[in-house]
Image (cartoon, rainbow, N blue to C red):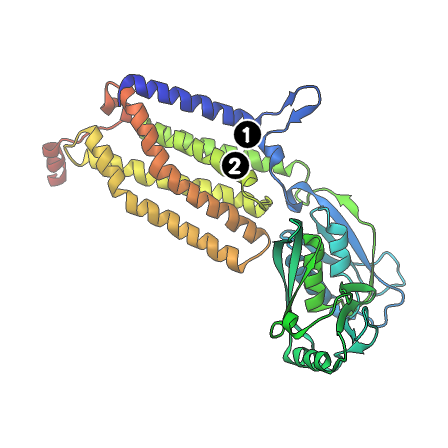
Amino acid sequence: MSKGKSITLLSIISVLMAFVLVMTFARFPIGEVKEYNSLLGAVELDYDLEGGVAYTLTLAKDNEEEVGDNVGSVIKTLENRLSALGYDVFSVKAVKSVDEEVTDYDIRIETKNTDSVASDIAVVAAYGEVKFYGGESANPTTEILTEQKVVADATYAGAITNRDNTTSYAVTIKFTSYGYNELVKAIDAAESSYYLEIKMNDTVLLSGSSAITKDVLQNGTVVVTSPSEASARQMALQMKDGGLKYKYDVDEGVAISAPYGEGVATKCAVAIITLSIILIALMIIVYKGLGLSAALSSLLFILIEGWLLIGVPGIVLSMGGVVGIMSATVLNAICMLVLTQGVKNEYVGSKKTVKAAVKKGFADALVPTISTCVVAGIVALVLLAFTSGVVKGFAITFGIGAVVALVSSLIFTRMFNALVTPLVKDKEKFFGFKRVDVDAKALVEEV
């Protein structure tokens, strides 16, 4: 590559990277009203970094059964239900009631403040059993299917597009053999249409305004829809698990700060930036010019990793995600170390030119670099599949980082090296390479 072309391309890339850096970290007004809040302000933060809302569940006065030592089981049930509704980071704990006459514990739920959090808490804390009503008229009131378990499973099935181009959210209900067989018998015995309605207390989970047929059941499975994602997830949860065994009253909720303290998100950002600066500085100090190419690639790695936090749908950054980013930054540095050290060893241990050593060193480092990133990606996928909460947050950001680190080490490092090398006259001095004379080396080994 010619010197002029290298200067032009480096200038363009430098301007773009400087622009992205400003947009990532700087805050400034736009016009008279709007204010650009930087990347840090655009990343969606979870409860442990931003704070959220707390709800207190107080045992209702008309509760019929004492909770006692079963409060641990209630807490576990609430945690499972919050996870089922998509909450990754939350706190559910028993607290002593302020009323000295009350022996049972209150339950405090702390989580991220979302548009549906109030209704979600009401759903997970709802009391009662799911009941089924059937008959030959719409909205039947005769209770049916009371002898055995009726619903084997209920899952949220995602968004669907209706014929009028509106969006609904589907729930797949799987009946047990008992439930399916009894419904088929009732449909066959009906002289006209047969209607099914499902309720939990006064909440209608499945409206009985439309007739149900054997074709609709599809061998024990029926798909119902809801106008919102939150209500569909809530329906699936209550259809599958019913309500709590104990009756609780839920307060209106209060805003709370992050459990790790005020400004914890900013402190995490500073920690990530500090780690990156230290690693970049070490690369340049130890590997000189080749380290500069690795440092520029690492800077690009950080920028891409950060922007993917707002570019990939559904990512909510938690403390686990922060640890994942820092771990991915170290992984990227390890990949850079494999590349740069491989090139240095190739030059020192042979009589190749700098250009030939770089080419051979990069080629030899291809397999170990790919292997390292692939193993890291597999670890992230396993954690993502089998864990939840902060560990899941770690898996997401670490997995993304493994992919970006692979691209950064195999593509960006080579690109920057190809752009920087034509600008240097004394390449050996720039790269900090010092070849050991073969005869001198042999003499030292003999001594």
Residue at x 63%, y 29% (from the top left corner):
37
* Residue 167 visible in the shown view: yes
Density class for disc 2 (Cα within 10 Å; few <14, some 14-19, many ≥20) is some
Res. 74 image quadrant = bottom right
Residue 205 coordinates in the image, percent (x, y): 75, 64
Residue at x 38%, y 40% (from the top left corner):
407
Of residues 412 and 90, the one nearer the viewer is 412
Res. 176 image quadrant = bottom right
Residue type at mark 1 is Thr
Tags 1 and 2 touching, CB below 8 Å = yes
Numbered circles on residues, count? 2
Dot 1 or dot 2: first in sequence order is 1
Label at residue 24? 1
Residue at x 73%, y 50% (from the top left corner):
116
* Lateral position of residue 30 relative to residue 124, left or right: left
Secondary element type, mark 1: helix
